[in-house]
Protein backbone atom coordinates (compact mmCIF):
# COMPACT_ATOMS: atom_id res chain seq x y z
CA UNK A 1 0.00 0.00 0.00
CA UNK A 2 1.12 3.55 -0.72
CA UNK A 3 1.49 5.71 2.42
CA UNK A 4 -0.77 8.76 2.40
CA UNK A 5 -1.46 11.71 4.59
CA UNK A 6 -4.89 10.59 5.78
CA UNK A 7 -6.73 7.45 6.79
CA UNK A 8 -10.50 6.97 6.75
CA UNK A 9 -12.25 5.32 9.67
CA UNK A 10 -15.52 3.64 8.67
CA UNK A 11 -18.40 2.39 10.81
CA UNK A 12 -21.79 1.12 9.69
CA UNK A 13 -25.00 -0.17 11.22
CA UNK A 14 -28.25 -1.53 9.76
CA UNK A 15 -31.84 -2.22 10.80
CA UNK A 16 -33.93 -4.89 9.09
CA UNK A 17 -37.62 -4.23 8.45
CA UNK A 18 -39.78 -5.87 11.09
CA UNK A 19 -40.91 -9.30 9.99
CA UNK A 20 -38.14 -9.79 7.42
CA UNK A 21 -35.11 -12.01 7.83
CA UNK A 22 -32.86 -10.17 5.37
CA UNK A 23 -32.09 -6.47 5.20
CA UNK A 24 -33.05 -4.95 1.85
CA UNK A 25 -30.11 -2.51 2.07
CA UNK A 26 -26.50 -3.44 1.37
CA UNK A 27 -23.20 -1.82 2.35
CA UNK A 28 -19.84 -2.39 0.66
CA UNK A 29 -16.60 -0.86 1.91
CA UNK A 30 -13.39 -1.46 -0.02
CA UNK A 31 -9.88 -0.12 0.56
CA UNK A 32 -7.09 0.07 -1.97
CA UNK A 33 -3.58 1.44 -1.68
CA UNK A 34 -4.91 4.88 -2.61
CA UNK A 35 -8.46 5.31 -1.35
CA UNK A 36 -11.44 4.12 0.69
CA UNK A 37 -14.73 3.55 -1.13
CA UNK A 38 -18.06 3.18 0.65
CA UNK A 39 -21.28 2.25 -1.18
CA UNK A 40 -24.72 1.95 0.43
CA UNK A 41 -27.62 0.69 -1.68
CA UNK A 42 -31.37 0.41 -1.05
CA UNK A 43 -33.17 -2.29 -3.03
CA UNK A 44 -36.76 -1.87 -4.15
CA UNK A 45 -39.18 -3.21 -1.53
CA UNK A 46 -37.87 -5.39 1.29
CA UNK A 47 -36.82 -8.93 2.06
CA UNK A 48 -34.95 -11.31 -0.22
CA UNK A 49 -35.63 -9.52 -3.51
CA UNK A 50 -34.54 -6.14 -2.16
CA UNK A 51 -31.48 -7.71 -0.57
CA UNK A 52 -30.41 -9.21 -3.90
CA UNK A 53 -31.00 -5.96 -5.79
CA UNK A 54 -29.04 -3.85 -3.31
CA UNK A 55 -26.24 -6.39 -2.96
CA UNK A 56 -25.72 -6.57 -6.73
CA UNK A 57 -25.74 -2.76 -6.92
CA UNK A 58 -23.31 -2.09 -4.07
CA UNK A 59 -20.80 -4.79 -4.98
CA UNK A 60 -20.93 -4.16 -8.73
CA UNK A 61 -20.49 -0.41 -8.25
CA UNK A 62 -17.60 -0.79 -5.82
CA UNK A 63 -15.85 -3.40 -7.98
CA UNK A 64 -16.18 -1.43 -11.21
CA UNK A 65 -15.09 1.89 -9.69
CA UNK A 66 -12.17 0.22 -7.97
CA UNK A 67 -11.03 -1.07 -11.37
CA UNK A 68 -11.24 2.35 -12.97
CA UNK A 69 -14.73 2.40 -14.52
CA UNK A 70 -16.65 5.70 -14.72
CA UNK A 71 -19.98 6.32 -13.00
CA UNK A 72 -21.58 6.36 -16.48
CA UNK A 73 -20.28 2.84 -17.11
CA UNK A 74 -21.50 1.72 -13.69
CA UNK A 75 -25.01 3.03 -14.36
CA UNK A 76 -25.16 1.44 -17.82
CA UNK A 77 -24.04 -1.92 -16.44
CA UNK A 78 -26.55 -1.79 -13.57
CA UNK A 79 -29.37 -0.97 -15.98
CA UNK A 80 -28.45 -3.97 -18.12
CA UNK A 81 -27.91 -6.33 -15.18
CA UNK A 82 -30.70 -5.69 -12.68
CA UNK A 83 -34.19 -7.10 -13.29
CA UNK A 84 -36.89 -4.61 -14.27
CA UNK A 85 -39.70 -3.79 -11.85
CA UNK A 86 -42.98 -4.79 -13.56
CA UNK A 87 -44.88 -1.91 -11.95
CA UNK A 88 -42.39 0.91 -12.48
CA UNK A 89 -40.71 -0.53 -15.57
CA UNK A 90 -37.18 0.24 -14.37
CA UNK A 91 -34.25 -1.58 -12.78
CA UNK A 92 -34.56 0.02 -9.38
CA UNK A 93 -31.94 0.09 -6.67
CA UNK A 94 -30.74 3.39 -5.22
CA UNK A 95 -27.21 4.05 -4.06
CA UNK A 96 -24.83 6.54 -2.50
CA UNK A 97 -21.10 6.17 -2.98
CA UNK A 98 -18.25 8.13 -1.50
CA UNK A 99 -14.60 7.62 -2.37
CA UNK A 100 -11.94 9.35 -0.26
CA UNK A 101 -8.29 9.34 -1.29
CA UNK A 102 -5.34 9.27 1.08
CA UNK A 103 -4.61 12.92 0.34
CA UNK A 104 -8.20 14.01 1.09
CA UNK A 105 -9.63 14.26 -2.46
CA UNK A 106 -13.18 12.87 -2.46
CA UNK A 107 -15.90 12.00 -4.98
CA UNK A 108 -19.59 11.67 -4.10
CA UNK A 109 -22.35 10.21 -6.30
CA UNK A 110 -25.97 9.87 -5.19
CA UNK A 111 -28.82 8.18 -7.00
CA UNK A 112 -32.26 8.52 -5.36
CA UNK A 113 -30.86 8.12 -1.85
CA UNK A 114 -31.12 10.82 0.85
CA UNK A 115 -28.37 13.43 0.64
CA UNK A 116 -25.22 12.46 2.50
CA UNK A 117 -24.40 14.60 5.54
CA UNK A 118 -20.95 16.18 5.83
CA UNK A 119 -19.42 17.96 8.78
CA UNK A 120 -16.35 19.26 10.52
CA UNK A 121 -16.61 18.63 14.24
CA UNK A 122 -20.13 19.70 15.20
CA UNK A 123 -20.49 22.07 12.23
CA UNK A 124 -22.19 21.39 8.93
CA UNK A 125 -19.89 21.19 5.92
CA UNK A 126 -21.75 22.56 2.87
CA UNK A 127 -21.34 20.48 -0.28
CA UNK A 128 -22.02 21.80 -3.77
CA UNK A 129 -23.71 19.04 -5.79
CA UNK A 130 -24.20 19.01 -9.54
CA UNK A 131 -27.02 17.07 -11.20
CA UNK A 132 -26.63 15.34 -14.53
CA UNK A 133 -28.53 12.68 -16.43
CA UNK A 134 -26.92 9.32 -17.08
CA UNK A 135 -29.04 6.93 -19.16
CA UNK A 136 -32.33 8.61 -18.14
CA UNK A 137 -31.33 8.59 -14.49
CA UNK A 138 -30.45 11.73 -12.55
CA UNK A 139 -27.20 11.50 -10.59
CA UNK A 140 -26.08 14.08 -8.03
CA UNK A 141 -22.30 14.42 -7.94
CA UNK A 142 -19.74 16.40 -5.97
CA UNK A 143 -15.97 16.63 -6.05
CA UNK A 144 -14.54 17.90 -2.78
CA UNK A 145 -11.55 17.88 -0.50
CA UNK A 146 -11.74 16.58 3.06
CA UNK A 147 -9.23 17.17 5.83
CA UNK A 148 -8.34 16.07 9.33
CA UNK A 149 -11.49 15.72 11.45
CA UNK A 150 -13.97 15.96 8.55
CA UNK A 151 -16.69 13.32 8.44
CA UNK A 152 -19.57 12.07 6.30
CA UNK A 153 -22.72 10.04 7.01
CA UNK A 154 -24.50 8.08 4.26
CA UNK A 155 -28.08 6.96 4.95
CA UNK A 156 -31.02 5.24 3.27
CA UNK A 157 -34.71 6.21 3.29
CA UNK A 158 -35.46 3.99 6.27
CA UNK A 159 -33.59 6.39 8.54
CA UNK A 160 -35.67 9.38 7.43
CA UNK A 161 -38.95 7.45 7.78
CA UNK A 162 -38.40 6.55 11.45
CA UNK A 163 -41.17 7.92 13.66
CA UNK A 164 -43.85 8.16 10.96
CA UNK A 165 -47.27 7.98 12.64
CA UNK A 166 -45.62 8.17 16.05
CA UNK A 167 -43.35 10.82 17.53
CA UNK A 168 -43.19 12.67 14.19
CA UNK A 169 -46.03 12.26 11.69
CA UNK A 170 -43.72 12.87 8.74
CA UNK A 171 -40.83 10.84 10.13
CA UNK A 172 -37.46 11.75 11.59
CA UNK A 173 -36.63 13.79 8.51
CA UNK A 174 -33.32 14.89 7.00
CA UNK A 175 -32.94 18.08 9.04
CA UNK A 176 -33.45 16.36 12.40
CA UNK A 177 -31.13 13.51 11.41
CA UNK A 178 -28.53 16.11 10.42
CA UNK A 179 -28.85 17.86 13.79
CA UNK A 180 -28.58 14.60 15.73
CA UNK A 181 -25.54 13.46 13.76
CA UNK A 182 -23.69 16.76 14.27
CA UNK A 183 -24.55 16.88 17.97
CA UNK A 184 -23.39 13.28 18.48
CA UNK A 185 -20.24 13.71 16.38
CA UNK A 186 -19.22 16.69 18.53
CA UNK A 187 -18.90 14.33 21.53
CA UNK A 188 -15.82 12.74 19.94
CA UNK A 189 -17.31 9.28 19.42
CA UNK A 190 -15.84 6.85 16.91
CA UNK A 191 -17.32 6.26 13.45
CA UNK A 192 -18.78 2.94 14.61
CA UNK A 193 -20.23 4.48 17.78
CA UNK A 194 -21.85 7.25 15.71
CA UNK A 195 -23.42 4.71 13.34
CA UNK A 196 -24.66 2.64 16.29
CA UNK A 197 -26.18 5.67 18.03
CA UNK A 198 -28.03 6.76 14.89
CA UNK A 199 -29.35 3.20 14.44
CA UNK A 200 -30.38 2.97 18.11
CA UNK A 201 -32.44 6.17 17.97
CA UNK A 202 -33.88 5.10 14.63
CA UNK A 203 -35.05 1.82 16.16
CA UNK A 204 -36.52 3.69 19.14
CA UNK A 205 -38.47 6.01 16.84
CA UNK A 206 -39.88 2.94 15.08
CA UNK A 207 -41.05 1.67 18.47
CA UNK A 208 -38.66 -1.26 18.25
CA UNK A 209 -40.30 -2.53 15.05
CA UNK A 210 -38.62 -0.89 12.04
CA UNK A 211 -41.13 -0.15 9.28
CA UNK A 212 -38.37 -0.09 6.66
CA UNK A 213 -34.80 -1.25 6.19
CA UNK A 214 -32.34 1.39 7.37
CA UNK A 215 -28.59 1.76 6.85
CA UNK A 216 -26.05 4.20 8.24
CA UNK A 217 -22.44 4.46 7.07
CA UNK A 218 -20.13 6.88 8.89
CA UNK A 219 -16.70 7.90 7.61
CA UNK A 220 -14.17 10.06 9.42
CA UNK A 221 -10.96 11.43 7.91
CA UNK A 222 -7.94 11.86 10.17
CA UNK A 223 -4.20 12.20 9.87
CA UNK A 224 -2.44 8.85 9.60
CA UNK A 225 -0.70 7.69 12.79
CA UNK A 226 2.85 6.56 12.11
CA UNK A 227 5.36 4.37 13.93
CA UNK A 228 9.03 3.74 13.20
CA UNK A 229 10.80 0.84 14.93
CA UNK A 230 14.56 0.27 14.89
CA UNK A 231 15.25 -3.44 15.38
CA UNK A 232 18.95 -4.22 15.74
CA UNK A 233 22.07 -2.22 14.84
CA UNK A 234 23.04 -1.65 11.19
CA UNK A 235 25.47 -4.11 9.62
CA UNK A 236 27.89 -1.24 8.89
CA UNK A 237 28.78 0.70 12.08
CA UNK A 238 29.29 3.79 9.90
CA UNK A 239 25.50 3.81 9.45
CA UNK A 240 24.81 4.03 13.20
CA UNK A 241 24.57 7.82 13.31
CA UNK A 242 22.43 8.36 10.16
CA UNK A 243 20.07 5.53 11.16
CA UNK A 244 19.55 7.03 14.63
CA UNK A 245 19.11 10.49 13.10
CA UNK A 246 16.48 9.06 10.76
CA UNK A 247 14.66 7.44 13.67
CA UNK A 248 14.56 10.70 15.63
CA UNK A 249 13.41 12.64 12.57
CA UNK A 250 10.53 10.23 11.88
CA UNK A 251 6.96 11.37 12.52
CA UNK A 252 4.81 9.65 15.11
CA UNK A 253 5.81 6.93 17.56
CA UNK A 254 9.49 5.94 17.80
CA UNK A 255 10.41 2.48 19.07
CA UNK A 256 13.76 0.79 19.70
CA UNK A 257 13.95 -3.00 20.05
CA UNK A 258 17.07 -4.67 21.42
CA UNK A 259 19.49 -4.07 24.25
CA UNK A 260 22.44 -3.43 21.94
CA UNK A 261 20.25 -1.20 19.78
CA UNK A 262 19.11 0.79 22.82
CA UNK A 263 22.69 1.34 23.92
CA UNK A 264 23.58 2.42 20.36
CA UNK A 265 20.78 5.01 20.30
CA UNK A 266 21.66 6.31 23.78
CA UNK A 267 25.32 6.60 22.78
CA UNK A 268 24.58 8.49 19.56
CA UNK A 269 22.26 10.87 21.39
CA UNK A 270 24.60 11.30 24.35
CA UNK A 271 21.78 10.41 26.72
CA UNK A 272 21.45 7.89 29.56
CA UNK A 273 19.36 4.74 29.22
CA UNK A 274 17.31 3.77 32.27
CA UNK A 275 15.78 0.35 32.93
CA UNK A 276 12.18 0.23 34.22
CA UNK A 277 12.17 -2.75 36.58
CA UNK A 278 8.47 -2.22 37.34
CA UNK A 279 7.73 -3.55 33.84
CA UNK A 280 9.50 -6.88 34.46
CA UNK A 281 7.42 -9.84 33.30
CA UNK A 282 7.84 -13.59 33.65
CA UNK A 283 8.29 -14.01 29.89
CA UNK A 284 9.48 -10.59 28.75
CA UNK A 285 12.50 -8.52 29.86
CA UNK A 286 11.78 -5.04 31.26
CA UNK A 287 11.43 -1.80 29.37
CA UNK A 288 14.02 0.94 29.24
CA UNK A 289 13.78 4.70 28.73
CA UNK A 290 15.63 7.08 26.43
CA UNK A 291 14.57 10.69 26.07
CA UNK A 292 12.98 11.27 22.66
CA UNK A 293 12.02 7.61 22.16
CA UNK A 294 8.49 6.44 22.97
CA UNK A 295 9.33 2.81 23.77
CA UNK A 296 12.59 0.94 24.32
CA UNK A 297 12.41 -2.85 24.67
CA UNK A 298 14.65 -5.88 24.68
CA UNK A 299 14.96 -7.56 21.29
CA UNK A 300 14.13 -11.12 20.33
CA UNK A 301 12.27 -12.38 23.41
CA UNK A 302 10.00 -9.33 23.28
CA UNK A 303 9.41 -9.59 19.52
CA UNK A 304 8.72 -13.31 19.85
CA UNK A 305 6.03 -12.51 22.42
CA UNK A 306 4.63 -9.73 20.20
CA UNK A 307 4.29 -12.26 17.39
CA UNK A 308 2.37 -14.58 19.73
CA UNK A 309 0.02 -11.80 20.85
CA UNK A 310 -0.75 -10.86 17.25
CA UNK A 311 -1.06 -14.40 15.91
CA UNK A 312 -4.64 -15.46 15.00
CA UNK A 313 -3.65 -19.12 15.27
CA UNK A 314 -2.53 -18.94 18.88
CA UNK A 315 -4.80 -16.51 20.72
CA UNK A 316 -3.26 -15.12 23.87
CA UNK A 317 -4.55 -12.89 26.63
CA UNK A 318 -5.37 -9.39 25.45
CA UNK A 319 -2.51 -6.89 25.76
CA UNK A 320 -4.93 -4.19 26.92
CA UNK A 321 -3.75 -2.95 30.28
CA UNK A 322 -0.61 -5.12 30.31
CA UNK A 323 2.41 -3.23 31.57
CA UNK A 324 5.03 -5.56 30.09
CA UNK A 325 7.09 -4.51 27.07
CA UNK A 326 5.38 -6.82 24.56
CA UNK A 327 1.86 -5.71 25.49
CA UNK A 328 2.84 -2.06 25.28
CA UNK A 329 4.49 -2.58 21.89
CA UNK A 330 1.41 -4.39 20.56
CA UNK A 331 -0.80 -1.51 21.66
CA UNK A 332 1.41 1.00 19.87
CA UNK A 333 1.51 -1.12 16.71
CA UNK A 334 -2.26 -1.50 16.65
CA UNK A 335 -2.74 2.23 17.28
CA UNK A 336 -0.58 3.12 14.25
CA UNK A 337 -1.74 3.14 10.64
CA UNK A 338 1.64 3.22 8.89
CA UNK A 339 4.51 1.20 10.37
CA UNK A 340 8.13 1.31 9.27
CA UNK A 341 10.52 -1.37 10.55
CA UNK A 342 14.23 -0.63 10.17
CA UNK A 343 15.93 -3.99 10.70
CA UNK A 344 19.67 -3.95 11.33
CA UNK A 345 21.66 -6.81 9.85
CA UNK A 346 24.42 -6.75 12.45
CA UNK A 347 24.89 -10.22 13.99
CA UNK A 348 24.30 -10.43 17.72
CA UNK A 349 26.87 -12.87 19.19
CA UNK A 350 24.35 -13.89 21.85
CA UNK A 351 22.09 -15.35 19.15
CA UNK A 352 24.85 -17.66 17.92
CA UNK A 353 24.79 -19.63 21.16
CA UNK A 354 23.54 -23.24 20.82
CA UNK A 355 21.33 -22.57 23.85
CA UNK A 356 19.23 -20.02 21.91
CA UNK A 357 16.23 -21.56 20.07
CA UNK A 358 16.55 -21.28 16.29
CA UNK A 359 13.25 -19.40 15.97
CA UNK A 360 14.50 -16.70 18.34
CA UNK A 361 17.66 -16.23 16.29
CA UNK A 362 15.74 -15.58 13.07
CA UNK A 363 15.14 -11.88 13.68
CA UNK A 364 14.16 -11.05 10.11
CA UNK A 365 11.62 -13.87 9.97
CA UNK A 366 9.95 -12.79 13.19
CA UNK A 367 9.64 -9.21 11.93
CA UNK A 368 8.14 -10.54 8.69
CA UNK A 369 5.61 -12.59 10.69
CA UNK A 370 4.67 -9.54 12.75
CA UNK A 371 4.29 -7.50 9.57
CA UNK A 372 1.91 -10.09 8.09
CA UNK A 373 -0.24 -10.00 11.22
CA UNK A 374 -0.32 -6.20 11.17
CA UNK A 375 -1.38 -6.17 7.51
CA UNK A 376 -4.28 -8.44 8.45
CA UNK A 377 -5.29 -5.64 10.82
CA UNK A 378 -5.29 -3.22 7.88
CA UNK A 379 -1.94 -1.61 8.67
CA UNK A 380 0.47 -0.32 6.04
CA UNK A 381 3.85 -1.91 6.81
CA UNK A 382 7.24 -1.23 5.28
CA UNK A 383 10.49 -3.09 6.15
CA UNK A 384 13.96 -1.74 5.39
CA UNK A 385 17.17 -3.64 6.09
CA UNK A 386 20.39 -1.88 7.06
Image (cartoon, rainbow, N blue to C red):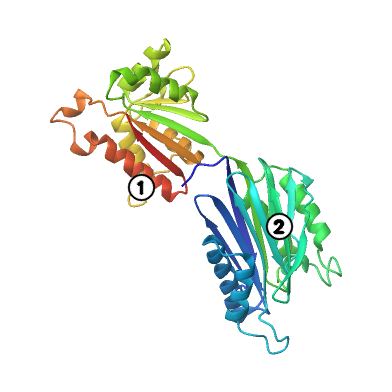
- Graded by Cα atoms within 10 Å as few (under 14), some (14 to 19) or many (20 or more), the crowding at tag 2 reads many
How many badges with numbers are in the image? 2
Task: From the viewer's perspective, tell me whether residue 216 is left or right of residue 125.
Answer: left
Residue identifier under label 1: 311
In the depicted view, which residue is nearer to us: 347 or 73? Answer: 73
In the depicted view, which residue is nearer to us: 29 or 144? Answer: 144
Residue drawn at (74%, 48%), measured in percent from left and top? 119
Query: Could you tell me residue 254's position as x and y percent?
Result: 46, 27
Residue farthest toward the right in the current orientation of the protein = 169
Quadrant housing residue 49: bottom right
Query: Could you tell me residue 120's position as x and y percent?
Result: 74, 44
Residue 199 visible from this viewpoint: no
Q: Secondary structure at mark 1?
A: loop
In the depicted view, which residue is nearer to us: 105 or 234? Answer: 105
Tag shown at residue 76: none
Quadrant housing residue 201: bottom right
Give the CA separation, mark 1 to mark 2. 34 Å
Q: Quadrant of the C terminus?
A: top left
Tag shown at residue 198: 2
Q: Which mark is first along the chain, 2 or 1? A: 2
Task: From the viewer's perspective, tell me whether residue 213 is left or right of residue 372.
Answer: right
Q: Secondary structure at mark 2?
A: helix
Residue drawn at (74%, 51%), measured in percent from left and top? 118
Q: Is residue 142 above or below residue 123?
A: below
Amino acid sequence: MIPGRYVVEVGHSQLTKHGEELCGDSVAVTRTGRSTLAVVSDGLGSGVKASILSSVTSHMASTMLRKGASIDEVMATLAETLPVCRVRQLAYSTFTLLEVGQEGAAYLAEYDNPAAIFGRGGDRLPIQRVERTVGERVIREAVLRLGDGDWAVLITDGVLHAGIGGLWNLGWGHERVDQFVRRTEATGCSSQELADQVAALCRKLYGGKPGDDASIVCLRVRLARKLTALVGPPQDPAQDRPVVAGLLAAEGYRVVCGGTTGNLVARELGLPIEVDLDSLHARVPPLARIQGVDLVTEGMLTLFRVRELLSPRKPRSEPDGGRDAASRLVRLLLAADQIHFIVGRAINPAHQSPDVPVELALKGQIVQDIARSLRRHGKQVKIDYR
